[in-house]
Image (cartoon, helix red, strand yellow):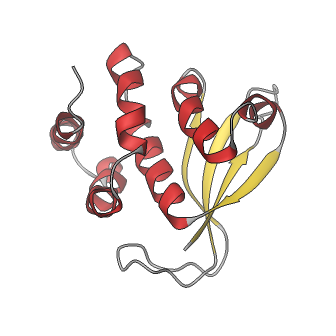
Amino acid sequence: MLFELRSLPDEKSNPRLFLMQLPFRPKTVRIEPVKTPMALAALEGDMLEMVRPAVEKILGTGKSEDFFRNDRAFVINEESGLRMLIVLLALTGSRRSERLAKAVKPMFEMNLADAEYWFPKLRALSELSPEKAERIRASFFAILDID
């Protein structure tokens, strides 16, 4: 599977981060291949500061500032893409807090098997009742072992 991390400012030049899945035959069975590029997750606003360490890890130190200011795209490998997808899905719909900020590093460093397990659960959150979605989100954050 091939992913693209894309920064695309809105009409007011506020940065937005998108994770795109590019057409490619996947190695994993959990994510179906796509025929055209597809946005899997997006994040904007205050939450972008929380993902900056993960973006730095993918792009290299010092490159994220330029990345967030411009319309830029980087192709990233399957492991980095799946981990970044977990981070973006977990943060989408969450409230900004110190605990969430502490969770980004463990989420991004999660082993690939765990990321593959949690991906479909986090992806389905928007389709579930708020109560069930909150239970799944709480279970996910509980396994991250953050204080």
In the picture shown, does residue 14 fall above or below 23?
A: above
Residue 122 at what x, y percent from top left?
A: 32, 51
Between 113 and 42, the one nearer to me in the picture: 113
Residue 95 at what x, y percent from top left?
A: 38, 22
**Total tally of numbered discs in the picture:** 0
- Seen in the image, is 78 located left or right of residue 94? right
Between 1 and 93, the one nearer to me in the picture: 1
Q: Residue furthest bottom?
A: 25
Between 83 and 109, the one nearer to me in the picture: 109
Residue 13 at what x, y percent from top left?
A: 82, 27
User: The C terminus appears in which quarter of the rendering?
Assistant: top left
The residue sitting at 74% across, 30% down in the picture is 62
Tell me where residue 114 sits by quadrant: bottom left
- Seen in the image, is 70 located left or right of residue 8? right
The residue sitting at 62% across, 82% down in the picture is 35
In the picture shown, does residue 115 fall above or below 97?
A: below
- Seen in the image, is 87 located left or right of residue 146? right
Tell me where residue 89 sits by quadrant: top left
Task: Work out whether residue 93 can be spotted.
Answer: no
The residue sitting at 75% across, 26% down in the picture is 14
The residue sitting at 76% across, 42% down in the picture is 8
In the picture shown, does residue 101 fall above or below 139?
A: above
Q: Residue furthest top?
A: 98
Tell me where residue 111 sits by quadrant: bottom left
Task: Work out whether residue 112 can be spotted.
Answer: yes
User: The N terminus appears in which quarter of the rendering?
Assistant: bottom right
